[in-house]
């Protein structure tokens, strides 16, 4: 057949429990993901990712704000006119203009050889709860170029987009995205947005202003050594759901933006090591951040038939200094069926406006059990302990 069906999906149910002294919170989360490409070898495809979450004993909150409980991250149907031309309806991220996020509405694309033309029309998701908002109209068009093979692919997109709020122009900008595998060892990705419309003190100006920039370069020097460098000054990301602990959220928030350099080296078949260093800077130095992270992985220790990972992280900001050291051990208990992981982290951080240091010990264990080819069970525990506060446990 010209179009061949390919389907994958998952249904999951999970509980997230937190215990602090006599206080306990139990959150439930149910998810459905389903991607059906060319259903029954037809021209129709669908892409869905939906989650529903609630806290036990707080059902009134769901009734009052259902948008906070139900999250539709993608829900779309696509029709292929041919291998290079299609139209899509619903909520969908367009990977050719991926940094714009999900688009609610229509997306059309037409391919002519290595050149493609596209248009979007619809709305932006509401930034408060990611629901549908008919006041956030957006529309635009783009032109792209694609060539090469899978390991040396070159793709570029140039788009012009207007976004409105209650029929008034909110943003008007040019979007550019480019990915390039110069060789199988060298990869470049760049995206940026340049605003063409601004209102300052009720005065409209159209002078270009760079508002978002992401640049990433990866180079495989040899079979053993690879390096990467990136620069990110995109706006802050909004997380509608997050299940990371406090220290991991803190590191992510403080290190995403700025200049980052990293590398990893394979010492042998069993041992690899690497590091990442980041520096966030501004002219005023009001939001300065410096971070370095290093790790060493030893795979399949002969005497234990387990893998071990050692890590260290140093973070310095205008308001916080922190040090984190960790060790993690992974072992396959029953081949292809049961996997176990144990970890320990020592955390030392101090807020600069607070005299006393905060030292924590974090330990965790998780088990993943592949009951069958299509059914899996996962359980995870983490405890955070310090000498000043009650233990905080997550299950």
Image (spheres, helix red, strand yellow):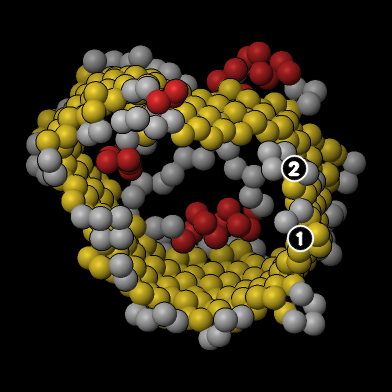
For residue 335, the mark is 1
User: Residue sitting at 84 percent across and 55 percent down?
Assistant: 391
> Considering the numbered disc 1 on the image, is that residue within a helix, a strand or a loop?
loop
Tell me, yes or no, if residue 5 can be seen here: yes
Q: Nearer the viewer, residue 312 or 386?
A: 312
> Considering the numbered disc 2 on the image, is that residue within a helix, a strand or a loop?
loop
User: Residue sitting at 55 percent across and 27 percent down?
Assistant: 50
Image quadrant occupied by the N terminus: top left
User: Marks 2 and 1, Cα distance to the nearest angstrom?
Assistant: 13 Å
Tell me residue 267's x, y (percent). 53, 86
| Residue position marked by numbered label 2 in the rendering | 372
User: Residue sitting at 37 percent across and 81 percent down?
Assistant: 222
The reply, left or right, for residue 249 in relation to residue 334 is left
Residue 251's place in the image compared with 44, above or below, is below
Tell me residue 214's x, y (percent). 30, 55
User: Residue sitting at 78 percent across and 55 percent down?
Assistant: 338
């Amino acid at each position: 057949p010209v179009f061949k069906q390919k389907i994958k999906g998952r249904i999951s149910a999970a509980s997230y429990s937190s215990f602090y002294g006599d206080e306990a919170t139990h959150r439930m989360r149910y998810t459905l993901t389903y991607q059906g490409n060319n259903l029954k070898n037809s021209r129709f495809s669908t892409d869905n990712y939906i989650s529903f979450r609630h806290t036990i004993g707080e059902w009134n909150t769901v009734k009052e704000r259902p948008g906070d409980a139900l999250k539709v991250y993608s829900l779309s149907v696509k029709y292929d006119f041919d291998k290079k031309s299609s139209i899509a309806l619903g909520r969908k991220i367009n990977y050719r203009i991926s940094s714009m996020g999900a688009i609610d509405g229509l997306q059309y694309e037409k391919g002519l050889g290595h050149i493609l033309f596209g248009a979007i029309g619809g709305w932006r998701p509401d930034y408060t709860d990611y629901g549908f908002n008919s006041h956030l109209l957006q529309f635009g068009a783009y032109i792209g170029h694609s060539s090469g093979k899978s390991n040396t692919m070159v793709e570029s997109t140039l788009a012009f987009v207007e976004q409105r709020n209650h029929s008034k122009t909110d943003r008007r900008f040019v979007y550019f995205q480019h990915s390039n595998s110069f060789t199988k060892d060298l990869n470049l990705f760049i995206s940026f947005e340049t605003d063409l419309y601004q209102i300052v003190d009720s005065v409209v100006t159209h002078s270009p202003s760079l508002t978002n920039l992401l640049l990433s370069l990866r180079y495989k020097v040899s079979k053993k050594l690879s390096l990467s460098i990136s620069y990110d000054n995109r706006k802050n990301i909004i997380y509608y759901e997050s299940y990371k602990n406090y220290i991991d959220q803190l590191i992510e928030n403080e290190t995403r933006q700025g200049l980052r350099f990293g590398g990893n080296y394979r010492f042998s078949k069993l041992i690899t090591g690497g590091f990442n260093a980041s520096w966030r800077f501004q002219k005023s130095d009001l939001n300065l951040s410096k971070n370095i992270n290093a790790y060493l992985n030893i795979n399949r220790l002969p005497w234990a038939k387990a893998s071990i990972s050692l890590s260290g992280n140093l973070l310095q900001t205008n308001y916080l200094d922190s040090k984190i050291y960790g060790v993690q051990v992974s072992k396959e208990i029953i081949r292809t069926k049961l996997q176990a992981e144990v970890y320990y982290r020592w955390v030392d951080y101090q807020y600069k406006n607070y005299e006393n240091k905060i030292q924590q010990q974090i330990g965790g264990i998780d088990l993943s059990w592949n009951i069958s080819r299509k059914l899996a069970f996962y359980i995870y525990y983490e405890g955070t302990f310090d000498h000043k506060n009650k233990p905080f446990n997550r299950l």
